[in-house]
Amino acid sequence: MINLNHIIDQVVKDKGIERSILVEALESAVLSAANKKYRNTRDLEAHYNQDQGEVELFEFVTVVEEVQDSYKEISLEEAREIDPDVEVGDSLGMKLDSGTFSRIAAQTAKQVIIQKVREAEREWVYNEFKDRVGELVNGIVRRYERGDLIVDLGRAEALLPHREQVPRESYRQGDRVRAYIADVKLSPKGPQVILSRTHPGLVMELFRVEVPEISEGLVEIKACAREPGSRAKIAVVSHDHDIDPVGACVGMRGSRVQNVVSELRGEKIDIIPWTPDIGRFACAAIAPAEVSRVYVDSDDKALEIIVPDDQLSLAIGKKGQNVRLAARLTGWKIDIKSESRAEEAQAQGFAAAEEEESSEDFSVDEGAESSSTVADDAASEGEGKA
């Protein structure tokens, strides 16, 4: 007969599973096997014997004067041969031959323990990571699965999906990777920790690690927008008048921001001072371009920014990147116009107004459509709002 105490003790030590959970599972497994053997015709109970290290099975019968169900009843005469003090109506428990079920216990012990170990590990993973969404973790790349990366975090494995990877970053088995915990999901196969290298939170958390003023709450990151692998903008504000938020994030000779850039493998970062004045904030967000005027439409959360003619391409950025990031950072729709285009549109507006007065009819202002305008679709969808 296998002494299950040794097996249980080893599993408790290695896997951290409570002993009571394993014991209960073994009792349940043996009882289920016995009921199946007897086709549920008997009243059985299974109990774990700590001293013997085995699961004992007991059959319970009711003491009656006249037996009608031989599986669940026993006559008073037979019962008193087992226990002289028994009376009619008592429940008598009789231990079944352990040899009959020792094989069952041995077979089920391994299966039950493996199952409980898996369940315990899944529960541990979920409990460990469910409250850590938004944190940075370090792991080792184990393998690729259909473009997704499986990352070893120690006692758990995490998934870095292809959609959460920066296109120009590549990894090999054994490489170290630092990522942002984007989500923890419960699936039929157990909990799944989802990592990201593209989430704006990755930039924010990297600055939190590098800049003590942020971790201490003296400087706050109000918003972050990024196009992974290319460029990011963060808006920061200081809660201490003696601390320059931008300077704190840049660090001496740019050391702090450079560490973040290195971790992001060369992604450029613009650090912008945040202000509650949306006009001033938008001017800072559109940097390095200079701004002539800003028109604010609070009802539609839209901004019209007028820049000098020679600053238009700089304000828009390569393929619209600069204005797109600015719109995400502010959470407002941004239209960029050069001064000449703005004056042309204004002139057309005056002409249309005069024509309207003379003809008492309405005309459509086509100037806005012909102006050089860049609108950020992502901002209109509400992405990256502070």
Image (cartoon, rainbow, N blue to C red):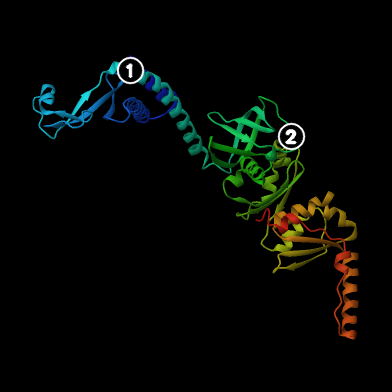
Residue at the spot 57% in from the left edge and 46% down from the top edge: 216
Q: Which sits in the foreground, 208 or 374?
A: 374
Instruction: Please tell me whether mark 1 sits on a helix, a strand or a loop.
Output: helix
Residue 244 in view: no
Residue 280 sits in quarter: bottom right
Specify the amino acid type for callout 2: Glu
Instruction: Please tell me whether mark 2 sits on a helix, a strand or a loop.
Output: loop
Q: Report x, y in % for residue 284.
A: 75, 57
Q: Report x, y in % for residue 126.
A: 50, 38
Q: Say if 295 sits above or below 105 in the image.
A: below
The quarter of the picture where the C terminus appears is: bottom right
Residue at the spot 45% in from the left edge and 32% down from the top edge: 120
Direction from residue 154 to residue 338 in the image, left or right: right
Specify the amino acid type for callout 1: Ser
Q: Residues within 10 Å of mark 2 (few under 14, many from 20)?
A: few
Which residue position holds label 1?
Answer: 102
Q: Earlier in the sequence, mark 2 or mark 1?
A: 1
Q: Report x, y in % for residue 93.
A: 20, 27
Q: Say if 247 sits above or below 292 in the image.
A: above
The quarter of the picture where the N terminus appears is: top left
Which residue position holds label 2?
Answer: 169
